[in-house]
Image (tube, grey):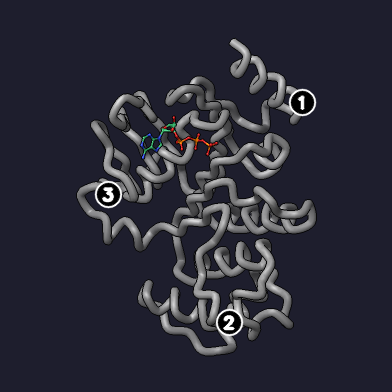
Amino acid sequence: MTYILEARELRKEYPGKLALRRLNLQIAPGEVFCLLGQNGAGKSTTINLFLGFIAPTSGAAYVNGLEVAADPLKVKAHLAYIPENVMLYPHLTGLENLALFSSLAGFRYSESELQAYLDQAGLPAEAVRRRVGSYSKGMRQKVGIAIAVAKHAKVLLLDEPTSGLDPKASNEFSQLLTRLSGQGTAVLMATHDIFRAKQVGTRVGIMREGELVDVRSTAALNAQELEQLYLTYMHN
Ligand SMILES: Nc1ncnc2c1ncn2[C@@H]1O[C@H](COP(=O)(O)OP(=O)(O)OP(=O)(O)O)[C@@H](O)[C@H]1O
């Protein structure tokens, strides 16, 4: 089995704070792995280690077999990152942002191709040529997805991507993820939304105090059982 994401004995310490104790994790292409856990459990730390935003204290993170800390540029080409607030250039339109980020990743597209990516990501046609500064949060998320698809990212790293989205936007976002995972994209997503985790996740991992304390297949649990499991860990 080839894994697209792998953590081996991954550990991150800050002065006086152990953020991630010892993570071992393998994620295959097409999997949607959701990380659940209270504030400070280590979810963002995990994602940031895969992104190479922070260096591990020990152990290693691998993307497509490449060690993140050793090969950061090659690794970046495989990844797309969507945080809670997607960072775009506010003075450029959605189309211009997509053109810019695609070209930085080495892809040049015609205007109609760019438009098609935005359309597939669900951005309303009226917004395509509007400056991003006037977009809603959900619209920025959609541009983020379009950028991920246009740069042919093998992996999406998502940090609370649906937090603050209305239920419709959140549902559309989930559908996009399901479609992308169906095409083989792997997703690692930190979320507080147990319902969405059950809906889009293939597996969920529960983190507590820097440790992955349980991993379950979502097929084996309904949303209520997942919530119960989560609460059990949080209260013990
Ligand atoms: N730069 C830093 N310096 C010191 N401690 C840090 C730093 N970054 C994170 N931490 C600590 O590491 C722990 C894990 O943080 P992390 O951001 O990974 O949690 P999280 O599970 O993503 O939480 P949330 O749900 O609030 O986003 C926390 O105790 C946090 O305070």
Amino acid on which disc 1 is placed: Gln
Residue 130's quadrant in the figure?
A: bottom right
Q: Which of 25 and 73 is in front in this view?
A: 73
Q: Earlier in the sequence, mark 2 or mark 3?
A: 3
Residue 60, percent from left and from top: 27, 37
Residue 141, percent from left and from top: 61, 62
Q: Tell me if residue 125 comes above or below residue 154 in the rendering.
A: below
Toward the top, the furthest residue is 236
Checking the image for residue 66, the label placed there is 3
Badge 1 marks a residue whose secondary structure is helix
Whether residue 64 is visible to the viewer of this picture, yes or no, is no
Badge 2 marks a residue whose secondary structure is loop
Q: Residues within 10 Å of mark 2 (few under 14, many from 20)?
A: many
Amino acid on which disc 2 is placed: Thr
| Side of 235 relative to 70 (left or right) | right
Checking the image for residue 93, the label placed there is 2
Residue 59's quadrant in the figure?
A: top left
Badge 3 marks a residue whose secondary structure is strand
Dot in front, 1 or 2: 2
Checking the image for residue 224, the label placed there is 1
